[in-house]
Image: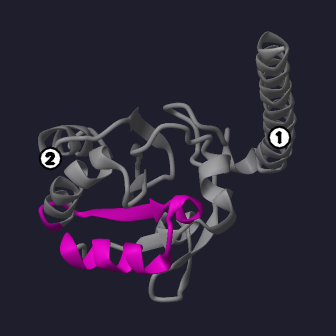
Amino acid sequence: MRKIIISGILLMMLGIAIIDFIKKEERNTEMDSRFQISAESDEDEGNVGLEVGDEAPDFELQSMTGDFITLSDYRGKKVMLNFWATWCPPCKAEMPDMEKFYQNSEIEILAINLVETETKFQDIKQFQAEYQLTFPILLDNGNKASDLYRIRPIPASYLIDSNGIIQYFTYGPMSYEKMMEEYMQLD
């Protein structure tokens, strides 16, 4: 009897995992088709995509101060997009270097917080104060930007040149030295 119950539970868990996988694949396919349509409609702008050499996909998010910011607002400037969360140990390790990088270069940093993974908004405010962050923190409500950029592990960073072209991306924390090295290669 015990083996039957355990087998039933395992089969149920396997079924749930398969259904979850199928739903994620359907969502990814939907995102791919929306992304393709967006990229095709902007032929004048170049190839919109996520690879080095592609034009970075545009988005609009609200900042901690309540302003709405789009990536295209920063056209003509060098930009670092950083996807992060307060509970993420590598994100915590990277933040002092990001602030130093922001202070010692002419780059615009847009730190995109994955709000959906946070327990409460106050955690983001406390994190900003604790790390004395002066660059804009954008709130990715509904995972709009993180889905668009297909963010899986965090932190994840993109360095974008003044023409809006992705020049570098990485998953995992970056050191100040690596940030400066990649920054020096931007136009």
N-term mark: 1 or 2: 1
Q: Is residue 136 above or below residue 161?
A: below
Q: Position of residue 24 (x, y in %)?
A: 79, 36
Q: Is residue 9 magenta?
A: no
Tell me the element at label 2.
helix
| Residue 132 appearing in the image | no
Q: Is residue 128 magenta?
A: yes
- Decide which of 82, 70 is in the foreground and name it: 82
In the drawing, does residue 68 fall left or right of residue 64? right
Q: Quadrant of residue 51?
A: top right
Q: Which residues are magenta?
A: 103-131
Indicate which disc residue 176 carries: 2
Q: Is residue 70 above or below residue 32?
A: below
Tell me the element at label 1.
helix
Tell me the crowding category of disc 2: few under 14, some 14 to 19, or many 20 or more residues within 10 angstroms, Cα based: some
- Decide which of 67, 25 is in the foreground and name it: 25
Q: Quadrant of residue 48?
A: top right
Q: Position of residue 83 (x, y in %)?
A: 45, 53
Indicate which disc residue 27 carries: 1
Amino acid carrying mark 1 in the image: Arg
Q: Quadrant of residue 117?
A: bottom right
Residue, x 37% and y 56% (percent of image)? 87
In the drawing, does residue 111 fall left or right of residue 9? left
Q: Is residue 109 above or below residue 65?
A: above
| Residue 17 appearing in the image | yes
Q: Is residue 90 above or below residue 104?
A: above
